[in-house]
Image (cartoon, rainbow, N blue to C red):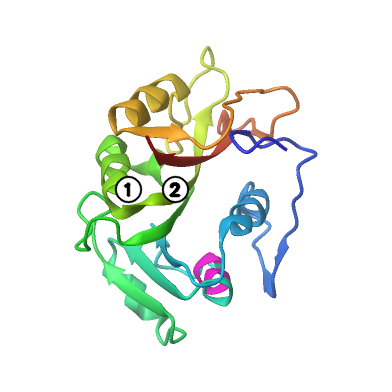
Amino acid sequence: MNQNDFFHLDDYNNHFFEGHQLSFGWWSRHYEYHWAIRYAQAGQIVADAGCGYTFRPFKNVLANHCAEVIAIDSNPKLMNLAPFPDNIAPLIASLEDVPLADGFFDRIFCISVIEECNAYENIINEFARLIKPDGRIVLTFDVIHDAGAPEHPRWKGLSLTDFLYTIDNAGLDFDGEYYADKNNALVNLEFNLCVYHCILKKR
């Protein structure tokens, strides 16, 4: 499995995630969560950026691997999920303007969020500010599968070409080789989407 590439049907996936049953209505998170958690390490201060205001177990599993998790979401309903484990700190904030110091995080995890944001370029710039010089951004996002087919009216995907331009402008590079292999890719034909995963670092 390439570090920076589309998810493929033969990549590891499981609807059971470290003690949590994932919804069978989630068509890609049983791939995304298992891939992303590999980059969590003991002692790290990490973000679950866009963690969601209904139950999403990723931040809880992060808390089992890392020293501290800042669970960030713009929706105040996040607080309805309290009580949180001692090493999860909820933060109500826009991902475009997170009230934390430069270089605060060892890792920023952002799972299937930026494709839903109107100004994801601003979010990428903010992530670049928030990671340490040797930090990493662990990112997944939906990409339009067939550019010649109609887009879904509700579920949007990014242009991978535009994303490459955005990270370059933010002073970020891929950690490892860049791939974009859609052969045998995980695809939702109804939504006309596939899912890209990557690790970004400061240039």
User: Which residue matches tag 2?
Assistant: 137
**Amino acid beneath label 2:** Ile
**Tag 1 secondary structure:** helix
Position of residue 68 measured from the top left corner of the image (x, y, whole percent): 43, 74
Position of residue 14 measured from the top left corner of the image (x, y, whole percent): 75, 57
**Amino acid beneath label 1:** Phe
In this rendered view, identify the residue nearer to me: 83 or 49. Answer: 49
The outermost residue toward the top is 148
In this rendered view, identify the residue nearer to me: 158 or 25. Answer: 158
User: Which residue matches tag 1?
Assistant: 127
Position of residue 100 measured from the top left corner of the image (x, y, whole percent): 22, 63
Mark 2 in CB contact with mark 1 (< 8 angstroms): yes
Q: Which residues are magenta?
A: 58-62
Q: Mark 1 or mark 2, which is nearer the start of the sequence?
A: 1
The residue sitting at 58% across, 76% down in the picture is 64
The residue sitting at 42% across, 48% down in the picture is 113
